[in-house]
Image: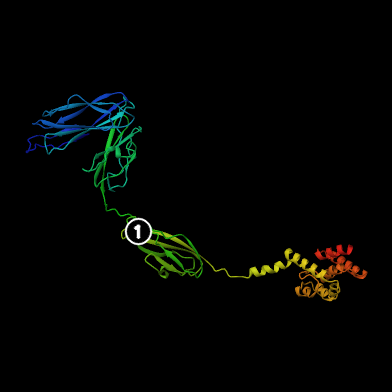
Amino acid sequence: MAHVGASSDDSASGLCVSLAVEDVTVRGQIGEPSQTAVVLQNHCTDKDIAIRAVDFVDTDGAFSLIGELPSVIPVGSSVEILVEFTAQADMIHLAELRLLVEDPYAPVQIAELYGVVSRDSDRSGDPPKAAIRSDTYAVETSSQVLLDGTNSSDPEGDTLTWRWSFHTLPETSRLIDGDITDYLMASAYFTPDIEGDYRVRLVVSDGTSTDKTFATYTATTSPDINHPPIADAGGAQHITTGDSVTLDGSSSSDPDGDSLVYTWTLATAAEGSALTSDDLTVLSDHAVAVTPDIAGLYVFKLRVSDGTLVHKDFITIYVNDVVEDTGTVEDTGTANDTGTVEDTGVAEGSDDDDSSSDDDSSDDDSSDDDSSDDDSSGKKRKHDHKSDDGSSDDDSSSDDDSRSDDDSRSDDDSSDDDSSSDDDSSDDDSSGKKRKHDHKSDDDSSD
């Protein structure tokens, strides 16, 4: 590949500036010097080309010039510049030979030198292919730029090495090749320091031959690049039928700080709902309120725009029916009437009543008729028990039990009372029920 200058006879200087400079790939082993030649060809037919200056840029310290540099390239001929290469590592080494001819209008001629570590010196095949995903980018100064060479390939499947470098930079840029992060990898990065064009070069090698390609990145301080806004409709909400809910998009943002326009619409309504987007009440530029008409799932869409680009987000509202008070809590109070805790409380109360007077026993005996009526009807009557002056309030089994308790506590009980108590206890045992007071009566009677 050659860099060719202007091919003309310049009338101002009278010098032919048609100079061909060939790029060179040098192969070698690490630590072992090898030589090659850079050929300078004068394509002029009637004039010599005078070399005013030669600038040799050795990026990695792997190259060196040998011998004297030519000052003139005779008409129709060529000259060679000897270069020595010593590989420093298994990588692509880079150097540039820049030539300036004796003509103020002639461009600088650049010969690029690539030094690689040879993997198979006897091998000859098709060269690899360097590729960058895009050859032009609009980028921002002070923002990282990705250099992607992963599309590079080798027709024989050989392992590739990469080398990224700057080919040209803006005039006042202070970047150097060392400012390219991961410059020996397939993907690399750099950050433009000023506005202008950054022409980047990628060289790939299979260890035998090389290939290169370029990409240009134009950096501006205030690039005409608009970033899309970010819509944020908020998190899901749960409400009950008849409640109003507020949809607020104030958490939305724009990376460029652009003003946003918010639009709320109904995306999905519960089955059977008559709700539409027209039912949304505007509260502010970013918030609306809505009252769903029936229970179910509703999805609302938030659309934000910066005037050019749009972003959308969604929020789900779950609407549940109102739960009516069915009195379940009060009903459970009835179940407590038969609870063990309350029975124990009653037993303690009954003992207090029984111990208050021996005469209570005779009063209880007088209520036998009421107790008998309750037992025959098969119902529990709280008020009937309460009317017995020494009996348990909650003793729902029988007034006979209360009589048995009270009779057993009497100091001067007659044998008739004892036998009555025993009869009652016998009757209760035959009924198959456990009664706390009956057992207590039997123990007292035995004493």
The residue carrying mark 1 is 310
From the top left corner, tell me how far across and down residue 243 is, in percent. Answer: 49, 69
- The residue at the point 46 percent across, 59 percent down is 235
Label count reads 1
Dot 1: element: strand
Q: Is residue 414 left or right of residue 392?
A: right
From the top left corner, tell me how far across and down residue 437 is, in percent. Answer: 82, 65
- In the image, 120 versus 427, the foreground residue is 427
Q: Residue furthest right?
A: 415
Image vertical order of residue 324 relative to residue 166, above or below: below
From the top left corner, tell me how far across and down residue 444 is, in percent. Answer: 86, 64
- In the image, 136 versus 403, the foreground residue is 403
Q: Residue furthest front?
A: 356
Q: Amino acid at mark 1?
A: Val
Which quadrant is home to the C terminus?
bottom right
From the top left corner, tell me how far across and down residue 431 is, in percent. Answer: 83, 65
Q: Is residue 211 left or right of residue 390?
A: left
Q: Residues within 10 Å of mark 1 (few under 14, many from 20)?
A: some
Indicate the colouring scheme.
Answer: rainbow
Image vertical order of residue 420 relative to residue 96, above or below: below
- The residue at the point 17 percent across, 30 percent down is 40
Residue 187 seen: yes
Q: Within the image, what quadrant is residue 130 found in? A: top left
- The residue at the point 37 percent across, 66 percent down is 285
Which quadrant is home to the N terminus?
top left
